[in-house]
Amino acid sequence: MNALFVTIKEKIDGEVLDAAGPQLKVVATISVGHDHLDVAECRKRGIRVANTPELLTDATAELTLALLLCTSRRLPEALNAVRDGGWTKWSLTWMVGPGLADATVGIVGFGRIGQAVAKRIKPFQVARILYSNRSERPNDIGATRVTFDELLKESDFVICCIAFTPDSKEIFNRSAFEKMKKTAIFINTSRGGTVDQAALVEILKEGRIRAAGLDVTTPEPLPLDSPLLKLKNCVVLPHIGSATIEATNAIAEMTARNILAGLTGDRMPGELK
Ligand code: DGY
């Protein structure tokens, strides 16, 4: 085997590389996230590695918005009520949730996806968009860089778009959630590993924040007896951030191109540097 075409579900480590054999030249993942690949180990063995950046930015940003609105406006709860007879009469305060207009939105991780989310949030007439990121990201959206702690304290909506690395592992822990407003909504479309999930369950149970919307969890799929699935104030999606027809076709093609270029020694469109 000369090349591996992998998804986020395949962990590529030294053991897999040993099994693949010394003729392996390329590992290409059909994803932007590459935390499932031991890139250093691949490099050590002279194996080229590629992912599919950019092509799923729009899809993931759209899903982030959809999940945010689904969570804040309680759409799953409302749909269930229509279906199970919980909708008995119209009532003024039933199913109310916070709006985006005049809210402060904080985006943790302001790379391509974070910025694409900010662009889509702006037309909702939010008061402020804050972001935390290792470096300043000049932008024409009017988003302001603040510290992680400031962002947690100030935001009505906290959106996690940060890449999953050892540095971002469980940055959303109990102490981070405790810094958030009691009325805040937490959204995660990055990776489940950025969250201490047990702490999130407790925080949601205690009503210490208003709600959470998660497209990513640990593990995936989430077991049916997960406490997250029992909480009314938590919306869980099955990691469908990039699942538009357009993005899926585009990343499939790019992964094939990455492999062909990798095998012929040409420039790979998504080579991980
Ligand atoms: C990615 O590409 O990293 C997305 O999370 C979809 O898997």
Image: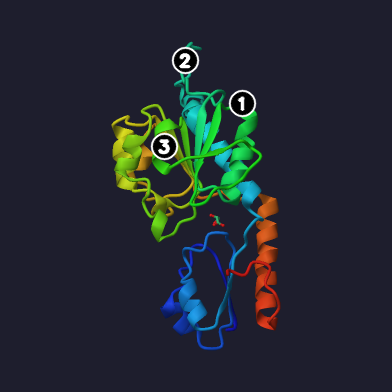
In the picture of the structure, the residue carrying the numbered disc 1 is 125
Horizontal and vertical percent for residue 160?
47, 45
The residue carrying mark 3 is 150
Q: Is residue 73 above or below residue 223?
A: above
Provide residue 96's location: percent of width, then percent of height.
47, 20
Residue 77 relative to residue 122: left or right: left
| Disc 1 from disc 3: Cα separation | 21 Å
Q: Where is residue 62, by image quadrant?
A: top right
- Res. 117 in view: yes
Q: Residue at x 63, y 53 (%)?
A: 56
Horizontal side of residue 245 vs 214, given as left or right: right
Callout 1: SS: loop
Mark 1 surroundings: few (<14), some (14-19) or many (≥20) residues within 10 A = few
Q: Residue at x 48, y 23 (%)?
A: 97
Q: Nearer the viewer, residue 172 or 96?
A: 172
Instruction: Residue type at mark 2: give it.
Output: Thr
Q: Disc 1 residue type?
A: Gln
Q: CA distance from mark 2 to mark 1?
A: 33 Å
Q: Secondary structure at mark 2?
A: loop
Q: Tell me the kind of residue under disc 3.
A: Glu
Say which label, 1 or 3, has the lower sequence index: 1
In front of the other: label 1 or label 3? 3
Horizontal side, residue 118 vs residue 254: left or right: left
**Residue under circle 2?**
88
Of the residues tagged 3 and 2, which is closer to the observer? 3
